[in-house]
Image (tube, grey):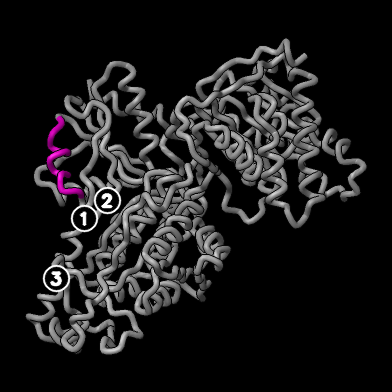
Amino acid sequence: MAESLNIQELEQVVVRFSGDSGDGMQLAGNIFSTVSATVGNSISTFPDYPADIRAPQGSLTGVSGFQVHIGASKVYTPGDLCDVLVAMNAAAFKTQLRYAKPNATIIIDTDSFGPKDLEKAEFKTPDYIAEMGVDPDRVIACPLTTMVKDALADSGMDAKSILKCRNMFALGLVCWLFSRDLDVAFNFLREKFAKKPAIAEANIKVIQAGYDYGYNTHSSAMNVYRIESKTKVPGRYMDITGNKATAYGFIAAAEKAGLQLYLGSYPITPATDVLHELSKHKSLGVKTVQCEDEISGCASAVGASFAGALAVTSTSGPGICLKSEAMNLAVIMELPLVVLDVQRGGPATGLPTKSEQTDLLQVLFGRNGESPMPVIAALSPTDCFDAAYDASKMALEHMTPVVLLTDAFVANGSGAFKLPKLEEYPAIQPPYVPEELRGQWTPYMRAENGTRYWAVPGREGFEHILGGLEKDNKTGAISTNPENHDLMTRLRAEKVAKIQVPDLEVEGDKDDADLLIVGFGSTYGHLHAAMDELRGKGNKIALAQFRYLNPLPANTAEVLKKYPRVVVAEQNMGQLAAYLRMKVDNFTPAQFNQVKGQPFVVSELVEAFKQLIF
């Protein structure tokens, strides 16, 4: 029995859960990720779900997937292809097999492969395994639905509720396959369904049934695998999505600055989860308002900033278009504001549940007039916490709106997050108008670094009015004077240009690389993995990933001109490359561009970069 099982140590593994949108694949994947992160494994996840509100059951277009990459050491991506594929129905098997390795283990629910299921999935023969060219020895075929019904036969639940537990059976089987501790999963469910304990216990019973099925049958004589952590730093860990990490980063920044946090937002995929998360934390002084449209969400945040709060507005690309007027109001009023742009596929409604990096030029230049605005891009789901904190600090200390770029990939993806200690984070010190300036202060009086002083309403002697019309530099009164407008335009630009950001870091063979890979934001993991693979084959490769896009790091030109070959890789048609050519003289990089709504594939990056080396 268990003593005779072959428990094999693995360095890493990729698991993909797939099924109908209503089959709970995201929940199963999240729980498996949490179980793995809790024991110290490095994880990277990729939820891949359709834009349909609810596609017809069993249809090819309605398949939802969740992929998780688990490693004993640091993993940078959710993986190109999976080692284990869970296919809850025929449509999932048909559409998701392309994401599986040739030797992948495939777990299927045979109860969902009936004649009608095969017809919906457009199979031509009843022998669906042979039709897909799969080795049957790699398939764990079990009557999953039947066993779930048997497990919950005495639960008193109705048939529909019982079927909703099918995902937990698959989760239990995968937990057995990778020797996972079920207690973490049980605790997760009891917390999630705290107000419905009967539902929690039913799901727990089904997880145990799935685990026992693997244990008792040894599932086609498969090995049991274990992935031990080799790089765990002591501390408390959690599996966290990028959106949740972003929300927590804003809360941390507000607490550090001693301010209330205000979010004015209009729901839009894939940014809405930030609104959802922040709305849960009224006890921490967080105020959230779901506004009637995008511009009111931003305009209300501008008002909250004027009143002295850490003000945030969240959206995706289409919402940035609509917020631009109110964003410019914050520019000319010189008020702190963080604009969160969780990028998605465009243009227009585009691909609302998919990921791109196509808003870069919009957030840099997509406003009327000269309206410079700092831009920061998060590198990973866990980096979203620090990126949100840094964007808040920059906005508050320099009295400027700041754009924080994430995207659907990092926002919905997750990683193992070591809970931070707030005392280790840098102080946030807004430039409040000094008391000694009482009686001589005017609204656009500036500190030595060019930042406008912040006079929070309620301070006697510092009453003032701000607005969207140009103001006189000295008095703060409305002014159409040409020289004053030229001066104010330059002062606003200089204030942003003077912001000090960390130097651009180079990883890999930074001293003698034959090729420098350049990217920004969320592609960091895939580009790093491609660099590692190429270096492992003896190539001299380096990577420079931009986190700060405006202002650019001071050493940008030095880094980009140091290497004989440079390739800029981004999920758009070349926006970063164009921006760098504008900022760096005689910079002519090669480019790698994809706009597929999907993350980069590391093997494709490796092949493309090879061509540039030889």
- Would you call the spot at circle 2 few (<14 residues within 10 Å), some (14-19), or many (20 or more)? many
Image coordinates of residue 197 in percent, x first then y, are 79, 51
In the foreground, 18 or 314: 314
Q: Are marks 2 and 1 in contact (CB under 8 Å)?
A: yes
Neighbour tally class for label 3: few under 14, some 14-19, many 20 plus, Cα within 10 Å: some
Segment colored magenta = 553-563
Q: Position of residue 270 (x, y in %)?
A: 50, 56
Q: Amino acid at mark 1?
A: Pro
Name the residue carrying label 3: 491
Q: Residue drawn 27% across and 50% down?
A: 548
Q: Residue at (23%, 32%) from the top-left corner?
A: 516
SS at circle 1:
loop
Residue 517 appears at what percent x and percent y?
A: 26, 34
* Residue 524, x across and y down, in percent: 36, 39
Check residue 551 in the rendering and tell me which mark sits there, or answer none: 1
| Neighbourhood count class around disc 1 (C-alpha, 10 Å): few under 14, some 14–19, many 20 upward | some
